Image (cartoon, coloured by chain):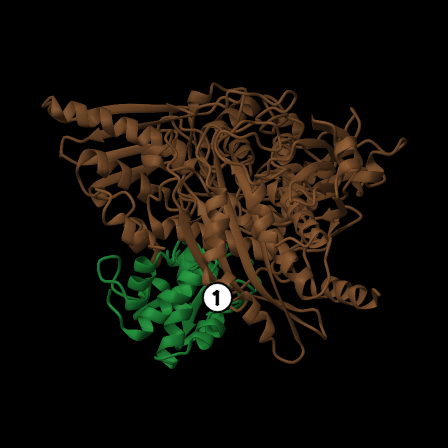
Chain colours: A green, B brown
Amino acid sequence: MISFTVNGRPAAVAVPDAKPLLDTLRDDLGLTGAKECCGKGECGSCTVLMDGEPVCACLVFTAQARGVEIITVEGIGGGPEQLDPIQAAFVAEGAAQCGYCTPGFIVAARALLDKNPHPTAAEIRRGLAGNLCRCTGYQKILQAVAKAAEGRAD
Amino acid sequence: MRSIDERRSSDGFQWVGRRVPRLDGPEKVTGRTKYMTDLHFANAAYGRVLRAAHPHAIIRRIEVSRARALPGVICVLTAADIPGLNGFGIIIQDQPVLAREKVRMTGDAVALVAAESEELAEQALALIEVDYEPLPAVTEPLQALAPGAPPVHEGGNLLQRTTLCRGDVARAFAEADAVVEGTFETPRQMHAFIETEGGWARLEPDGSLTIWCPAQAAYRDRLQVARILGWNPNRIRIISSPLGGGFGGKDELTVQHYLALLALHTGGRPVKLHYKREESVVAGIKRHPFRVEAWLGANRDGTITALQARIVVDKGAYASLGPAVLNLAVEHIAGPYKVEHVAVEGLLVYTNNGTNGAFRGFGVPQTCFALESLVEMAAERLGIDPLALRKQNVVRRGEVDGAGHRIESSVAVWECLDAVERSSLWEGRAEWVAAAPAGKLRGYGVACGVHGVGLGKGVPDFANAAVELTAEGRFRLLVAPQEIGQGNGTIYAQMAAEVLGCAPDEIEVVQGDTGQVPDGGTVTASRGTYAGGMATVNAAKKMATLLGQGAPPPLRAEGYFILPQAAGALPGIIGAPHHVCGYAAQAVLLEVDALTGETRVERVVSAIDCGRVINPTGLEGQSEGGVVMGVGFALCEDTLMEGGLHRTRNLTTYILPTTCETPAIETIAVESCEETGPFGAKGIGEVVMVPVVAAIPNAIARATGRVFRLPATPERVWAAMRKEAQQP
């Protein structure tokens, strides 16, 4: 068994050590927010936090998560009725289109703002440069994260 | 100029034109949305597809007994196991479901496996023995047309020739004050939807089949799958929405047919297929690479008089929507200009370079690059301002465009160019260029474009929708076009709410499920808002009538819309002309590194003739996303192939723009009001990425030297820069 914490709750899974953490989250724990797009750590769609650090879950062996605290998009905010400010800003700005990359962006943006609550525009761009989106052209994503950082509620 | 939002406050609509937040937003930002590839069923079987080992080869023998004998393998299927037609393709069914005698690309499927786990399915693939006799790979379209070239298909390598001829180009060129020419080449762009192809299928206890698969045309997919199975389509239900991106890449069948075949052999167990990116790259369609050799003639007074072009298209191995792509490219090659003398020949040529098909823009970005480069070159030659030259030549309502089609619908391309001219980007362009720091070269560029809405002349094109009022008193809107990212579910709800007098979030919108929604056609061809919207409005109006009569719930009202067709025709070009078109003008500021040839797009202004705006946030989302897809096409994206093999295999070497490359984009809505559309709206999902692909090379030309091949990689820009520097 491999034990760790996911979104504040203890989890124990009986999977091969080398099973990608992404597959364990999706197949064994039913957390399908993180997505596979490239499987090579290139797109950021599978971004989760490991002890607060954003990682591509497709590149992490499940065994590496032993004893670690994992946060996925499902653990950010209190669900659709109680959105995290970043999630609320994404909705208000229209920063999610097809939405398949959105969980990765939300997690990466949360990690960015946790470390740097008042980033410059250039810092937001660099902080999200590991995440690919094919729908939005990024402008509304950058605006949403800036808005969340400024604490604007509109 | 007043903003979209200011104008909206005085037009009397409650929901149309407002920034209604997406109804699916909260679900998407919390990761709760279940895409088809997120579904999980108990007792599942896992499928895999065996791909061809060669780009072009005869199959001598396929031996599956060792694979079938592997413990944990549920079934191994080959062409012999297909009950119906072993072929698919939206227009011509020239692509085998499973190759029997020959493979024509490395993406060809040869066998299918279902097993207890993905690992076992993978092991089984390795046990299938295929004996090939390799043939020479056909990789250059021009060589493919030469006598004696190996035929990809029995009928030879020329799949289609489309021509357009009007006026007298020879005389027009002889009389023109300036003739410019060039040969323009474009990349094999990848859709790069974030969700790769995948899904599930299950044979139900009643003998019907359910397929869950992200797709852009569920009813047509159902027809194609039924043909392959030899079934009545009514026995098949396809659930196709939402998609994790499509852009045309999920318009053709992707995995539906493989899922269906496997589900017939798994004893009622649900079966899953989900491509890894590498398989998606090899098997999936791409944008057709074009080679456009073209000449443009113009007079000293600025009138564009003549256009001649020869288009050679790398079709790849199978037709898919290629014939329609070539036809639209020919229809729109003269852009929105009133060119009187036009001669175009387009050739669609089979090769072994994977396969190509529908992709946002549908052949038009490729020809726009050629045309708008030539327009810029002509302006330079004549010493006329490039924007003024365009304004002088663009078509207005009632006038005849370059294809010979009299425009009898809304057109505001002149107004789009005018909006660009008045933008702060354009007004400040000279100052910005002059302020280039040391080691940088700066330029600005502009272009305009047109893109048809709907499937065009002679192609059946309609949409249906239904509005229900449930016994509990809740509205449900049932509409076919899938939620592919553009937010059509929200704008359908806005339109229905406007008619019904309720709020958009009081309407449950059901999309893309053949078991629930009436056939509404595809979510392609810039038709979602226009066609799905009109069907929605018509259904909602009928519901409003029922309610006005005091009818008690439950109630159901159905509405339909048949897309109006152009009065004229372009003989020999199926699908042309289009009665309704979207137009756009876009300008860019771009900087080139004088040492390395690296480029950076600083700012873009995107003026769009969209009819009436239904949701400004949605319009901006399309505009911004389209612009950045165009930036990728122009500057960095290409799927490289060599000898019929993919050198680009994943996003590690397929370079997409990121947050660091995206420019600041200003979207200007030019509202022309299309009277045949819902509340005056028309479709713009494709035209938003058209002009920018030419505005960028035009900016590069102004900064350094002209590029004739996209993407304009640093190497190509550097070469253009050197060539320019060596000219006397």
Can residue B249 be seen at all in this image of the molecule?
no
Q: Please tell me how crowded label 1 is: few (under 14), some (14-19), or many (20+) other residues with Cα within 10 Å.
A: many
In the image, taking residue A43 as reference, residue B174 lies left or right, namely right
Residue B249 found in image quarter: top right
The percent position of residue B462, horizontal first and vertical second, equals: 42, 24
Q: Hey, what amino acid is under mark 1?
A: Ala
Question: Farthest residue in the front direction?
Answer: B301
**Residue B698, percent from left and from top:** 64, 56
| Closer to us: B693 or B503 | B693
Query: B648 or B50: which is nearer to us?
Result: B648
- Residue visible at 70% across and 37% down in the picture: B307
Side of B691 relative to B183 (left or right): left
Quadrant of the snapshot with the C terminus of chain B: bottom right
- Residue B617, compared with residue B452, is above or below; it is below
- Quadrant of the rendered image containing residue B468: top left
Quarter the N terminus of chain B occupies: bottom left
Q: Where is residue B36 in the image (x, y as percent from the top left)?
A: 43, 44
* Count of numbered tags: 1
Residue drawn at the location 82% of the way across and 39% of the way down: B142
Residue B434 pos. (x, y %) = 60, 73
Left or right position of B646 against B587: right
In the rendered image, which residue does mark 1 sit on?
A57
The chain under label 1 reads A
Left or right relative to B341: residue A42: left
Q: Can residue B671 be seen in this view?
A: yes
Task: Give the residue displayed 35% in from the left and 54% down from the top.
Answer: B28
Relative to the observer, which residue lies in front, A149 or B602? B602
Callout 1: helix, strand or loop?
helix
